[in-house]
Image (cartoon, rainbow, N blue to C red):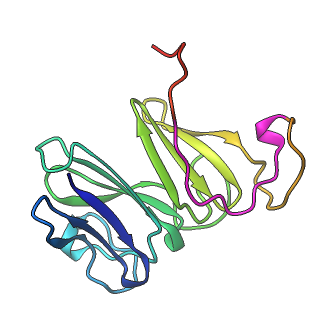
Amino acid sequence: MYIYIADSRNNKIKYVDTEGLIHTLVGTGETGDRAGVLSKWCTLNKPKGVFAQDAGTMNQVVYIADTFNHKVKFLNTSGIVYDFIGNGTAAITNTTLNLPTGLYNIGNFLFISDKSSIRAYDKVAHNLILLAGNEANGYNQNNIQANAALLDYPLHLSVVPSPNDD
């Protein structure tokens, strides 16, 4: 078992290996927004989320919620970190994020929580789909459409397939 950690104030992504040793996977520790480089040279700005699949294998997939850069970054199998979603601004469009935190990947979709919404990024169509929240912070009652709801900094999320999902 591997444990992945978004070490936010140290601007690093770390992991604990099967021997119980901790290692830096991504980040120099400096605050910044450097991507397109080896993971040890990448800079982050208070990452608050990480999602990994197939840890310790050649197929390892790691997504990073680079929160204060308003981006999701992707660590590929060659050890290069790329900007995956977001353009570095907090403006909400179909391709931008506002303080992303939580991540969860299933199939062709990466689910993301940000400042006021839950979105799914379709990795085939390359667009963000609003699932919950209406891009304004706040609170309102239950039993309304999810995309009309007010959310206030949802930090994490979990996605569970319904019994009818194939």
Q: Nearer the viewer, residue 104 or 160?
A: 160
Where residue 122 sits: x, y (%)? Answer: 49, 34
Q: Residue furthest bottom?
A: 30
Question: Within the image, what quadrant is residue 89 found in?
Answer: bottom right
Where residue 143 sits: x, y (%)? Answer: 86, 35
Where residue 150 sits: x, y (%)? Answer: 81, 52
Q: Residue furthest right?
A: 141
* Residue at figure coordinates x 68%, y 56% from the top left: 92
Question: Within the image, what quadrant is residue 38 found in?
Answer: bottom left
- Magenta segment range? 145-159
Question: Within the image, what quadrant is residue 70 found in?
Answer: bottom right
Residue 97 seen: yes
Q: Is residue 36 left or right of residue 94?
A: left
Where residue 63 sits: x, y (%)? Answer: 36, 53
Q: Residue furthest front?
A: 20
* Residue at figure coordinates x 11%, y 44% from the top left: 58
